[in-house]
Image: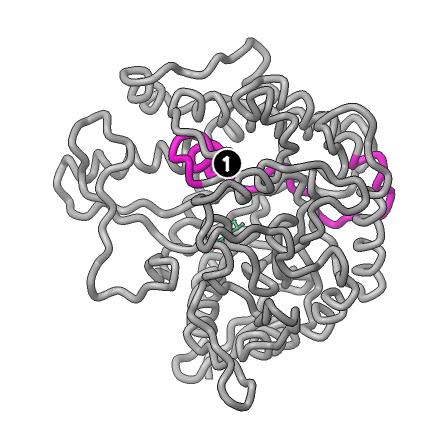
Amino acid sequence: MAKYLFPEGFLWGAATASYQIEGSPSSDGKGESIWDRFSHTPGNIFDDDSGDTACEHYRIYREDVRRMADLGLNAYRFSISWPRIFPEGSGKPNQKGLDFYRRLIEELHNYKIKPVVTLYHWDMPQALQDQGGWGNRDTAKYFGQYAACVFESIDLPVDRWITLNEPWVSAFLGYALGVHAPGLNDFNIALQAAHNLLLGHGLAIRSFRDIKRKDEPIGITLNLNPIEPASDSKPDLAQAVRTDGFMNRWFLDPIFRGSYPQDMVEVFSRSFDLPDIEEEDTAVIAEPIDYLGINNYTRILVRAGSSEDDFMGNPLNPPEAEYTEMGWEVYPRGIYELLTRVHRDYGPLPLYITENGAAFDDKPDKDGRIDDSSRINYLQDYLIEAWKAMQEGVLLEGYFVWTLMDNFEWSFGYSKRFGLIYVDYPTQKRYFKDSAYWYRDVISRNGLEVQGGAQ
Ligand code: IFM
């Protein structure tokens, strides 16, 4: 029996996001978000679904918190819906929106579950999008004001704060590829959006430091992937460096080094407008943070693209590999590579895996049991690799499964199930999958016990 024990105080959590679970899109004065608008536009979402109902968490959050307690979670990562707090994006905050999150945090405290709060998980007030959204520099300022309002108004202990979730996704899937809200297809605007997102992050950190919350750590969550060349050929190796520059370093470098990576500045400048950057911006973006949150699901294996300015390359799916329902390769070693790389190149600093998980085609059997052994294997193998990274000095302090319960998976609607808990959408009943029981055991042992091998 191999044992992989984690340190005392390790955070064992699950993560969610407001638009994906809450429903109640206009309750208590909530304003329209870009995801309300995007998903109500026919053709954007699988089956033309939307987050209007989702998991009805806004209404039945107490039941969900009780389930978290049944799972034994000691931490829960959720996001605040910006348009619940500022229905029009700025101006006077909506007290009822703030009250909801206060009640949720109180409920978590009742069960000794540590709240980990993300300020932005993609649901921007539509009113700000009407002025250009993240393409408009003012949005960064409004985000800073929203953050300050939350820091001041939610006067309850919060264990970790996260400014943004996956700004790469917000900028490039939202403004360049058009598959996420707001659905634009303009790489120039996407580059500006990426910069303004980072600026908003830095402004939020500044207001956090100015306000009070001195002993509550704050960081940002990036979606990072290990990028590997398909071969040792020079073009493939160079491609992997560029793809890494686009997907990882374009965010890591300004946050930790105070500048955009020069090789990518050159690549982008040959085909696009570089973002407008004002004098103080790089210092704001590089405001020191207390930890980094990492979302990782897979790796990216690339073959060289058509030119030396191709920053995507041609991603490959090795035929012998296993894939999840999202078509993402299961590649546990990737999380070891990623954690040790971030530690080496940008650390040492505390790290959290703020998302990791897998979508599979889960179905209850005739007795209602949901056998999701593929998910258990996935989570177990990723956790073992994370543990190995810790043996090499990586300061990993917590792990959050994506996700607590099946929910609205953006443009895929309800067709992908990532949850530990199965949601029967027509009845809104929840059922623990086998992975939920498995995770409960992991948490209660503070680690894994795996047949075979020895540790
Ligand atoms: O559902 C998303 C989440 O909102 C952000 N990270 C990736 C998850 C799975 O696609």
Q: Is residue 66 magenta?
A: no
Question: Residue 178, percent across and down?
Answer: 42, 35
Mark 1 sits near ligand 1, with its Cβ under 8 Å away:
no
- Residue closest to the far front: 42
Question: Residue 292, percent across and down?
Answer: 57, 42
Q: Residue at x 70, y 26 (%)?
A: 144
> In which quadrant of the rendered view does residue 128 lie?
top right
Q: Residue at x 59, y 12 (%)?
A: 280
Question: Residue 301, percent across and down?
Answer: 26, 49
Instruction: Give the SS element for disc 1.
Output: helix
- Residue closest to the far top: 279
- Residue closest to the far left: 233
Which amino acid type corresponds to the residue marked 1 in the rendered image?
Ser
Q: Nearer the viewer, residue 440 or 446?
A: 440
Image-based side of 94 in relation to 242, left or right: right
Q: Give the magenta part as a residue range.
A: 150-179
Compared to residue 4, the image places residue 167 above or below, namely: above
Q: Residue at x 77, y 30 (%)?
A: 148
Q: Residue at x 74, y 33 (%)?
A: 87
Q: Is residue 170 magenta?
A: yes
> In which quadrant of the rendered view does residue 266 lie?
top left
Compared to residue 228, the image places residue 259 above or below, namely: above
Identify residue for label 1. 170
- Whether residue 353 is visible here, answered yes or no, is no
> In which quadrant of the rendered view does residue 29 lie?
top right
